[in-house]
Image (cartoon, helix red, strand yellow):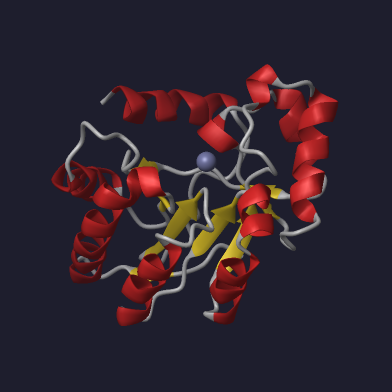
């Protein structure tokens, strides 16, 4: 439960978008770290099956290496966001260097949305980026990247923490694929049963 609790504390200190409450039962699925040729097409198949559009926070370097997979995201009507060029941690990087990396990613990802890798960003970096980007965090982290967790646990996190307006993180990566590809359809089925409508972050 440590990650979930930490998230509550981070929400107090990082002035960014953690959920989107608008009085409707909307939910926002987000996928970080792609595009990935082994995984992204499978995610797209699952989303297509339920006719759901989602938001993908892409790593610029992955977009550069797999432009055709990135184009597939756009062609399928999903929204994309900037997740830096090299998936760097803001805490370990000077403000200028961080902004340069985001800017470099911006040359291959046309978007006004940004999500900091690991959620690690300094207040100064955040302030600068907010001049050009909506900075999107999350309030439900499935921890699909953790090999010690089973897909059932990812699902139970979704069930426990999702509420109207929640932004849920999955990872579009090989490391997370075993958990994510199993947990995602189960989570979608549960969210549909709970009356949620899926939206992209605008
Ligand atoms: Zn990431």
Between 33 and 15, which is closer to the camera in this rendering? 33
Between 115 and 21, which is closer to the camera in this rendering? 115
Left or right of residue 1: residue 28: right
Q: How many marks?
A: 0
Q: Quadrant of the C terminus?
A: bottom right
Location of residue 47 (image quadrant): bottom left
**Residue at the image position 39 percent from the left and 75 percent from the top:** 52
Left or right of residue 42: residue 74: right
Q: Quadrant of the N terminus?
A: top left
Q: Position of residue 120 (x, y in %)?
A: 58, 27
6 is higher (above) or lower (below) than 156: above
Location of residue 5 (image quadrant): top left
Left or right of residue 73: residue 23: left
**Residue at the image position 38 percent from the left and 66 percent from the top:** 43
Q: Position of residue 188 (x, y in %)?
A: 26, 65
Residue 130 seen by the camera: no
Residue 133 seen by the camera: yes
56 is higher (above) or lower (below) than 136: below
**Residue at the image position 40 percent from the left and 23 percent from the top:** 6
96 is higher (above) or lower (below) than 53: above
Left or right of residue 41: residue 87: right
198 is higher (above) or lower (below) than 82: below
Q: Position of residue 192 (x, y in %)?
A: 24, 70
Between 177 and 184, which is closer to the camera in this rendering? 177
Q: Position of residue 170 (x, y in %)?
A: 39, 50
**Residue at the image position 31 percent from the left and 43 percent from the top:** 144
């Amino acid at each position: 439960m440590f990650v979930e609790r930490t998230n509550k504390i981070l929400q107090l200190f990082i002035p960014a978008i953690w959920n989107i409450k608008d009085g409707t039962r909307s939910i926002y699925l987000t996928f970080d770290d792609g595009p990935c040729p082994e995984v992204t097409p499978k995610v797209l198949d699952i989303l297509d099956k339920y006719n759901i559009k989602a938001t993908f926070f892409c790593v610029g370097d992955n977009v550069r290496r797999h432009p055709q997979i990135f184009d597939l995201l756009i062609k399928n009507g999903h929204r994309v966001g900037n997740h830096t060029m090299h998936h760097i941690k803001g805490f370990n990087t000077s403000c200028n260097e961080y902004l340069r990396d985001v800017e470099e990613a911006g040359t291959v990802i046309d978007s006004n949305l940004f999500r900091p890798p690991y959620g690690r960003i300094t207040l100064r970096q955040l302030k600068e980026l907010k001049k050009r980007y909506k900075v999107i965090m999350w309030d439900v982290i499935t921890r699909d990247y953790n090999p010690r967790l089973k897909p059932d646990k990812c699902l139970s996190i979704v069930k426990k923490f999702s509420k109207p307006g929640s932004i849920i993180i999955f990872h579009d990566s090989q490391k997370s694929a075993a958990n994510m590809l199993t947990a995602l359809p189960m989570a979608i089925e549960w969210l549909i049963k709970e009356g949620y409508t899926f939206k992209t972050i605008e």
